[in-house]
Amino acid sequence: MGRIKQGLDYFPMSTSFMHDRIVRRVMKREGDAAFATLVETLSYIYAGKGYYIPASDEFYDELTDSLYNTDLDDVKRIIALAVECGLFDSGLFRQYGILTSADIQRQYLFITKRRSSSLIAPAYCLLEAEELASYHTSPNSKNSAEDADNKTGCDVTPTADTVTSTTDSATSEAEMSTLGTQNKEKQIKTNQNKLNHLSDSPQGENGGGKILKRRKVMTQEEIDNLQPPSDGTQRNFEGLLENLRSYKIPPSEQYAIILKSNFGAIGNPVWKGFSNIRGSNGKIKLPGHYLLSVIN
């Protein structure tokens, strides 16, 4: 059996790549030769492993040989500057000596999503679990959906069995709807209790006996000490906190995002929001406000 191809035969490039802020910063310091070096590096990445390449001496030598009027020292300096500016992930470069990025991995998975196997090594992966899952559609679930569509299109004559089954199904759905409503109300009450617990409620002397609620100012330490509820919901709370801290979102906004995302529940729109922020290349200036608008 032939070996499954890992690399790509082609890769798309944005028409604004040359005008990208990071690319222009590298070119400003290293000249026009930097553009050819970066494009050739991307070609090596996509054609080789598909989403990364080890920055070894052999790689630098081959890259230098494929370029004109650019020596080995120039190539290494350009690549190092690209890593420093964020075109490639600096953490993986320092730890594993590889060149990759979240955008490169995202592009690789999009192009290879029809393959039976197009996985990214966990140690190198820069994407969230739910985003990874969006690139892989289970063949069984696809076939099941097609079978269900075919069955719906063919079985148009009702029988006693199908009527009974439909009635049972409707009853079951009604019960599930009731349970879902109860769980939702319970969650709302839980969140409200947390808000009340974190609020000061002094008795107003001149306010006609009204209670004035003042929200407590959250600190980063209090945010870090929060614990998600044990209700069986799949979450990535640690990943949520790490992302919130990395974008320097104020603790008060962090707390609102934590509650609205159900403590980083898997599948919550907050994860898509983080992905959009990363893909904006710094154009989203208020990430906290943006995330709140996404999950509201």
Image (cartoon, grey):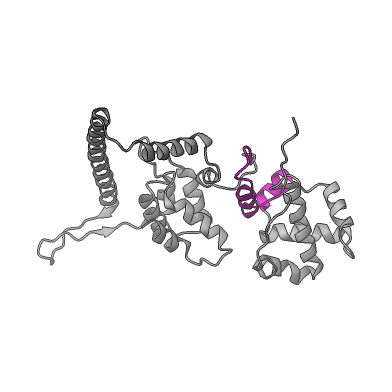
Work out whether residue 20 or residue 5 is closer to the camera in this orientation and state it.
5
Residue 259 magenta-highlighted: no
Residue 114 x %, y %: 60, 44
- 267 to the left or right of 9: left
Residue that appears at 49% across and 39% down: 142
Q: Is residue 213 above or below residue 152?
A: below
Please say if 72 is above or below 286.
above
- Percent position of residue 183, x then y: 27, 40
Position of residue 296 in the picture relative to residue 175 (left or right):
right
- Residue situated furthest top in the rendering: 161
In the rendered structure, the answer to whether residue 20 lies left or right of residue 169 reads right
Residue 283 x, y percent position in the rendering: 54, 67
**Which is nearer the eye, 132 or 217?**
132
Furthest toward the front, the residue is: 157
Residue, x 50% and y 59% (percent of image)? 248
**Residue 120, quarter of the rendered image:** top right
Q: How many labels, in total?
A: 0
Q: Is residue 99 magenta?
A: yes
x and y percentages locating residue 159 in the rendered image: 26, 31
- Give the quadrant of the C terminus: bottom left
- Report the quarter where the N terminus lies: top right
Q: Residue 194 versus residue 2: which sits nearer the camera?
A: 2
Q: Give the extent of the magenta segment.
A: 89-118
The residue most toward the left is 208
Depth check, front residue: 276 or 119: 119
In this rendering, does residue 247 appear at all? no
Residue 291 visible in the picture: yes
Q: Is residue 149 above or below residue 99?
A: above
